[in-house]
Image (cartoon, helix red, strand yellow):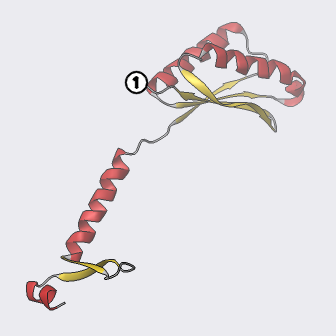
């Protein structure tokens, strides 16, 4: 303690459970500042996950399907996750099997660009499926 006062710095306890306890003489304010700076850099380097959505109807025809599939390919190439869903309006809920076939067809055609994270699952009036982009090596 005398040594830290002599230098005009702070005595910081690093490991209190050790025998004897480990202490370090440092400028505590500077230490906190550098720690915050490191955390900020780590946060900036962390990748942010972007989720793009594509909506289908249970009776989507081939041209519309191909058009939306091109968008899905673009999203996966950009590195965004894809949420593809079939929305059932009114009595169209009777075509659940057509909606599932549509999503599974999309998954099989996008297999080289991404992998299915969640298989088609019916939640209320929506059947949802998630596709994550494949990592580049």
Q: Nearer the viewer, residue 9 or 106?
A: 9
Quarter of the figure that contains the N terminus:
bottom left
108 or 17, nearer to the observer: 17
Mark 1 nearby-residue class (10 Å; few <14, some 14–19, many ≥20): few
Residue position marked by numbered label 1 in the rendering: 137
- Extreme front residue here? 19
Where in the figure is residue 132, as x and y percent of width and height?
56, 30
- Total number of numbered labels? 1
Q: State the image coordinates of residue 108 (x, y, percent, origin top left).
A: 65, 15
Against 123, is 84 above or below?
above
Quadrant the C terminus occupies: top left
Task: Tell me if residue 118 comes above or below residue 56 in the rendering.
Answer: below
> Is 50 on the left or on the right of 83, as rendered?
left
Q: Name the quadrant containing residue 34.
A: bottom left
Could you say which quadrant of the image residue 11 lies in?
bottom left
Name of the residue lying farthest toward the bottom = 2
Relative to 116, residue 51 above or below? below
Look at 59% across and 25% down and name the residue there. 115
Residue 114: x and y in percent read 55, 23
Spot the residue most to the top. Answer: 63
Task: Give SS at disc 1.
Answer: loop
| Residue at (11% x, 85% y) in the render | 8
Say whether residue 111 is left or right of residue 16.
right
Q: Give coordinates of residue 109: x percent, y percent.
A: 62, 13
Which quadrant of the figure has residue 13? bottom left
Residue at 82% over, 29% down: 89
């Amino acid at each position: 303690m005398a040594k830290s006062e002599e230098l005009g710095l702070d005595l910081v306890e690093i490991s209190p459970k050790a025998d004897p306890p480990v202490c370090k003489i440092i400028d505590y304010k500077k230490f906190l500042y550098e720690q915050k700076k490191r955390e900020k850099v780590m946060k900036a380097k962390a990748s942010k996950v972007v989720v793009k959505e594509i909506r289908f109807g249970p009776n989507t025809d081939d041209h519309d399907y191909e058009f939306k599939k091109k968008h899905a390919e673009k999203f996966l190439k950009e590195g965004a996750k894809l949420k593809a869903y079939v929305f059932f309006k009114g009595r169209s809920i009777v075509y659940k099997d057509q909606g599932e076939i549509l999503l599974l067809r999309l998954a099989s055609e996008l297999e080289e660009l991404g992998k299915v994270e969640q298989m088609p699952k019916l939640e209320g009036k929506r059947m949802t499926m998630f596709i994550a982009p494949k990592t580049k090596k």
